[in-house]
Image: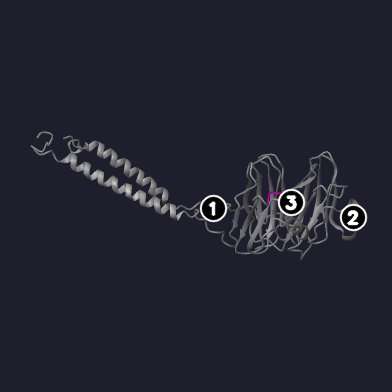
Amino acid sequence: MFSLRHLPASPRSLRRGAKACAAVGLVLLLGALPFTAAHPVGMVRQSSSGGGPGGGNGQNVGVNLTATDAPAFTPNSFTAVAGSVVELRIMNNGSLAHTFTLSKAANHRLLPNVTPAELNAFFNANGSFVNVTLAPHSLTFANLSVPDGSGGNSYEFVSVLPYQFQAGMAGFLNVSAGVSGPPVSLNVNALAGQTLWDPSVLAVNASSYPVAVDVAVTNLGSSTHTWWLSPFPNYNLSFANFTTFFQAHPPLASVNLASSPGGTVQANFTVAKAGVYEYICTVPGHFANGMFGFLYIGVPPPAPAAAPGTAIVQEGVLVLGGTLLGVGGALTLVASFTGRFPRQPGSDESHH
């Protein structure tokens, strides 16, 4: 009679089967192990220059601004220390005339739908710290004496020529009571083809306040974006009402990113106290689609998020992987014994 006992497996084939089972089992076990996704946090470095824009004991410091025919100011926010003197260097690189008119009304944001006549009436009533006309393709200098005791205040600057402010030519001077140490430099990117900031978490390890922060905001794509920072710590902006919120509360920093890939603008601002400050893109639809992030000042950023729970699947994979490893070990053992001991004389049962 023909019997499978008469065709024993060779040691080599058993070893191959053992290795295959063990390899599959090991892969399954490793795949079932939990992992932690890296949570990107913006890198922080201390700048070598002290004081930041408008920083330090009343000495002259310089701030560079650019006026464009967009129309816009770049950057559209800068920081100065109360009691300091700031030399403004404003380059008009467009073919249109503009003005740089800095309001004396503290913490007041002009409504974007005011008429040119209403805008002029506002400045006639409230006055301006600086009011200069910027000729096309020219460089203009102006000295700004930041008032003592104005720390924590924000002042809006605009172009008062008809409909330039209404088209977006505005920005803010943010005043601090004094900067603690050199400014901290951060980087954040608008991702190409996505409505996301990278990183979506920035962190500054500050222990004394106020602290100056410089954020380099880079557009990696070809869409227009903005980077606006909430002036309030520990406050979550809403998709539905962030526009009216910023109309009532000027942003701590606000810059516009042109649609040219690789373009970088600097957002310079001073933070007065610890907390979590939210930043968003104000282009319609971008915030709601995920273009927001958080700046952690003096508080630890969140711990890295764990991978999605797959406990049930992982349990089955672990059992299967362990079984296959066991089968591989058993086959290895059988192969070692089969190849190690010679067959005893007379044990061949193929003959009766």
Picture residue at 79% right of the left edge, 42% below the top: 70
Q: Badge 1, how many Cα within 10 Å: few under 14, some, many 20+?
A: some
Q: Secondary structure at mark 1?
A: loop
Which residue is located at x 12 percent, y 38 percent?
Answer: 343
Amino acid on which disc 3 is placed: Gly
Tell me, for residue 73, which label it has, or none: none
Horizontal arrangement in the rendering, residue 15 relative to residue 125 (left or right): left
* Residue located beneath label 2 in the image: 118
Question: Within 10 angstroms of label 3, few (less than 14), some, or many (20 or more) residues?
Answer: some
Q: Nearer the viewer, residue 212 or 75?
A: 75
Q: Which residues are magenta?
A: 283-287
- In the rendered image, the residue lying farthest to the front is 1
Q: What's the residue type where badge 1 is placed?
A: His
List the single residue furthest toward the left: 346
Q: Judging from the image, what secondary structure is the residue with disc 3 in?
A: strand
Q: Position of residue 319 (x, y in %)?
A: 36, 52
Q: In the rendered image, which quarter contains the C terminus?
A: top left
3 vs 2, front mark: 2
Residue on which disc 3 sits = 62
Q: Which residue is mark 1?
A: 39
